[in-house]
């Protein structure tokens, strides 16, 4: 059995800054409301017709590959986590392979659809493949181009003010015998009871049949059309994410501390041993609650949601990459990643950087 490590990291955020004030022109919201409820001051939006999720991911991936000191052609497995894929199918994994000019077919490409926990789920998959010796250079990318699919009218304000675009990537490799870097454990959880509480339902092949007794305003007489975009979907605003914000918030503040403690306890560690916690950047208030609950110092919790918003699958690798480039983590430091989101799914990863 090998030990696995993060050998390279990089991130990319689009140039265009979108401050809260700009959203005030599109919907009934205010800078004060957004800052007070979420901590977000601005986010980045990619360029329409010029950038997409795969392209943002490729920019982050090239940096991670260079940081690992390898060539793209040496990547033997791609894991791509996103909720805003370029296409319904195929997934972004193969599109990234093409974008990076990897022509070898001796490579696997996997898409992870676990939204905010996508990066932690992807890291867990990569860790297993490295440990068994199946792959040697795994590229794991979290990338989102949310701005293409948000309702920027007042109807969608509880969701659209939160999200931003960006990408982060890591390369995972086997750790050498004398290296301090090592993934200590990954812990994954899911509870499908709440699948529709944070979801993008239509279009989809659900045929108007939902897992819960919920009314999404879908016309069941037209159910065969669920896979297509209908006038009714447009009118009812169904072509956008739907979120029960309060339920998500209440559940998140329970699951984050629990899954972080699970990772620490399994490794025989406690919160004071952590150099840094990189929580999924969902809401600054959630991260502050988690910090208080675990008794962590300010310097032990990384937050950049203020400038990027919630970038879903990209938020953890962007934050980890920034923390690294700012010198907040050194080789051997104990780092914990934790995520919670749609599904509900949640998870954590503990490693020595
Ligand atoms: N601007 C102004 N007012 C707003 C906005 C807005 N952008 N959005 C909602 N409001 C209004 C509501 O209409 C409501 O008005 P009312 O009292 O007149 O009915 C009021 O503000 C309060 O609305 P709530 O939804 O109760 O506000 P809350 O304090 O819960 O904050 C928020 C909303 C920020 C979305 C919060 O619930 C939250 O952060 N939830 C968790 C989000 C999250 O973590 N998501 C997980 C990751 S996403 C993923 O996995 C894809």
Image: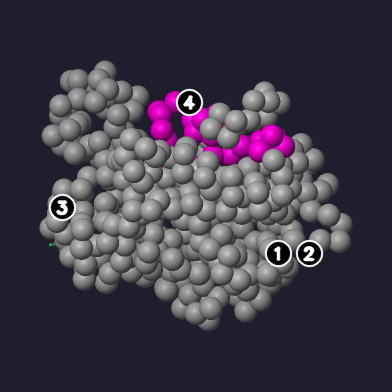
Q: Where is residue 242 drawn, in percent x and y? A: 28, 45
* Residue corresponding to mark 3: 26
| Marks 4 and 1, how far apart at CA | 35 Å
Q: Which comes before the other along the chain, label 1 or label 2?
A: 2
SS for dot 4: loop
The quadrant of the image that shows the C terminus is bottom right
Residue appearing at x 20%, y 57% in the figure:
23
Q: Which comes before the other along the chain, label 3 or label 4?
A: 3
- Asked whether the viewer can see residue 196, the reply is no
Label 1 lies in ligand 1 vicinity (Cβ under 8 Å): no
Left or right: 138 with respect to 239? right
Reply yes or no: does residue 77 show up in magenta. yes
Above or below, 113 against 30 in this view is above
* Residue corresponding to mark 2: 180
Q: Nearer the viewer, mark 2 or mark 3?
A: 3
Q: Which mark is residue 36?
A: none
SS for dot 3: loop
Q: Which mark is residue 90?
A: 4
Residue appearing at x 36%, y 46% in the figure:
46
> What's the image's color scheme?
one colour
Near mark 1 (Cα within 10 A), the count class, few <14, some 14-19 or many ≥20, is many
- What is the magenta range? 72-97
* Residue corresponding to mark 1: 352
User: Is mark 1 in CB contact (under 8 Å) with mark 2?
Assistant: yes
- Asked whether the viewer can see residue 15, the reply is yes
Q: Which comes before the other along the chain, label 2 or label 3?
A: 3
SS for dot 2: loop
Near mark 2 (Cα within 10 A), the count class, few <14, some 14-19 or many ≥20, is some
Which residue is most to the right? Answer: 177
Reply yes or no: does residue 71 show up in magenta. no
SS for dot 1: strand
| Marks 1 and 2, how far apart at CA | 7 Å
């Amino acid at each position: 059995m090998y030990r696995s490590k993060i050998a390279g990291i990089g991130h990319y955020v689009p140039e265009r800054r979108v401050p809260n004030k700009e959203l005030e022109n599109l919907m009934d919201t205010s800078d004060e409301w957004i800052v007070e409820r979420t901590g977000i001051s601005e986010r980045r939006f990619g360029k329409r017709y010029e950038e997409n999720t795969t392209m943002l991911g490729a920019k982050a991936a090239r940096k991670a590959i260079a940081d690992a000191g390898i060539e793209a052609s040496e990547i033997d497995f791609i894991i791509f986590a996103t909720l805003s894929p370029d296409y319904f199918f195929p997934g972004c994994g193969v599109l990234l392979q093409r974008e990076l000019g990897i022509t070898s077919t001796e490579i696997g490409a996997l898409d992870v659809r676990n939204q905010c926990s996508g990066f932690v789920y992807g890291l867990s998959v990569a860790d297993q493949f490295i440990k068994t010796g199946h792959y040697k250079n795994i590229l794991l990318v979290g990338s989102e181009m949310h701005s293409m699919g948000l309702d920027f009218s007042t109807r969608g304000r509880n969701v659209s003010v939160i999200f931003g675009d960006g990408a982060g990537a890591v390369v995972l490799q086997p750790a050498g015998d004398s290296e301090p870097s090592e993934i200590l454990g990954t812990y994954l959880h899911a509870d499908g009871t709440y699948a529709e509480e944070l979801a993008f339902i239509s279009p989809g092949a659900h045929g108007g049949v939902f897992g819960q007794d919920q009314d999404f305003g879908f016309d069941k007489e037209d159910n065969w059309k669920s896979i297509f975009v209908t006038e009714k979907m447009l009118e009812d605003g169904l072509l956008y994410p739907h979120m029960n914000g309060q339920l998500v918030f209440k559940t998140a503040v329970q699951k984050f501390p629990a899954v972080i403690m699970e990772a620490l306890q399994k490794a025989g560690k406690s919160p004071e041993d952590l150099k840094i916690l990189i929580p999924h950047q969902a809401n600054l208030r959630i991260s502050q609650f988690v910090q208080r609950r675990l008794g962590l110092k300010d310097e032990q919790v990384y937050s950049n949601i203020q400038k990027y918003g919630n970038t879903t699958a990209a938020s953890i690798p962007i934050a980890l990459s920034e923390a690294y480039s700012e010198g907040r983590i050194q080789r051997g430091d104990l780092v914990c990643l934790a995520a919670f989101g749609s599904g509900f799914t949640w998870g954590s990863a503990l490693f020595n950087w």
